[in-house]
Image (tube, rainbow, N blue to C red):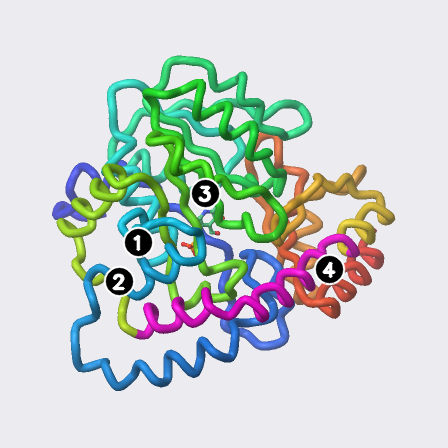
Amino acid sequence: MSRFWSSVVHGLSPYVPGEQPQLDGIVKLNTNENPYGPSPRVLAAIAAATDRLRLYPDPRASALCGTVAARYGIAPEQVFVGNGSDEVLAHIFQALLKHDAPLLFPDITYGFYPVYCRLYGIRYEEVPLDAAMRVQIADFRRPCSAILLSNPNAPTGIGLARAAIEALVAEHPDQLVVIDEAYVDFGAESAVSLVARHDNLLIVQTLSKSRALAGLRVGFAIGQRPLIEALERVKGSFNSYPLGCLAIAGAVAALKDDAWFEETRARIIANRASLARGLSELGFEVLPSVANFVFARHRSRGGAQLAAELRELGVLVRHFPKPRIEDFLRITVGTEDQCSRLIALVRRLI
Ligand SMILES: Cc1ncc(COP(=O)(O)O)c(C=O)c1O
């Protein structure tokens, strides 16, 4: 604390990301990183782009917007890119979610959402997930300015069908619906195809998970032009160059390497199935995940204690000390070896 702090800073309680230990030999299944690494073409593209380090990057990152647009069959002007989807989300909160009526999001979801609300002074209400930890769109029928869902939801991993998202968007024509699709490539239905028909829908994606580029920091939003323009206004008032030339080059190469993308995500989906099976056999309830993590609780062992014991054994998983989910562990789907090691250690512990 200092007398130089503004009143805003006094009121902040920042998001606490999962631990990033600087030690070798740890099995790191706590922050939903991709265990297979990025496409080798990304590394080549980044090396080639070093020639341009002297220059400021393209402030609009046109090459990247064009690549995203080509992949999704939309116009480049419908794409907004930023320094990780966290930054894209931050701009969305400031540009589009601050109104008189509250913003709605589930009680169990990505922990950064309430942090942005506090940063920007946005009123919000948490809508409880149902007893099975599912989003029920009927529960969102209440006065609000906007709705924000992560699909699949984090940390539950449960997906919401595209038809349900379209129903939600249609039921709220005067409210913005933001769908955070950070994990969508691991088996959920993307709502990008609905953007053409709905001016109140905005999609956010990241290259941190399915493209294995968490360290490069690239995310994007897709929506109709007036929404993207609002984000460009905020960005242009904050940082003209959020993406460096290396990030732009690497992201373009990643989005173009379909073979690498398909192969690595198929392996993660297969590992997820065996991890879930292994945990169920050891007495865990495992929520049905379409993400690159599983959310599971043991019938008799508490989540905090299990996470601490696994940590002692060199395996990091994520535990959230929060009502309704304190007995759960969120376990990132690792390589075949990492998943087997986790199962063997859990068997020893319970
Ligand atoms: C639901 C969700 N959205 C967004 C993000 C942010 O991802 P990034 O800033 O790496 O793009 C995360 C990160 O874990 C997440 O879980």
Which residue corresponds to mark 1? 76
Give how far across and how far down residue 120 sits, in percent: 25, 36
Q: Of the numbered discs in the image, which one, if any, rests on residue 314?
A: none
In the picture of the structure, the residue carrying the numbered disc 3 is 192
Left or right relative to 287: residue 229: left
Secondary structure at badge 4 equals helix
Residue located at (50% from left, 72% from top):
22
Q: Earlier in the sequence, mark 1 or mark 3?
A: 1
What's the residue type where badge 1 is placed?
Pro
Q: Secondary structure at mark 3?
A: helix
Residue marked by disc 4: 271
Q: Secondary structure at mark 1?
A: helix
**Gap between marks 2 and 4, in whole Å?**
36 Å
Residue type at tag 4: Asn
What is the C-alpha distance between the residues marked 2 and 1? 8 Å
Upstream in the sequence, badge 1 or badge 4? 1
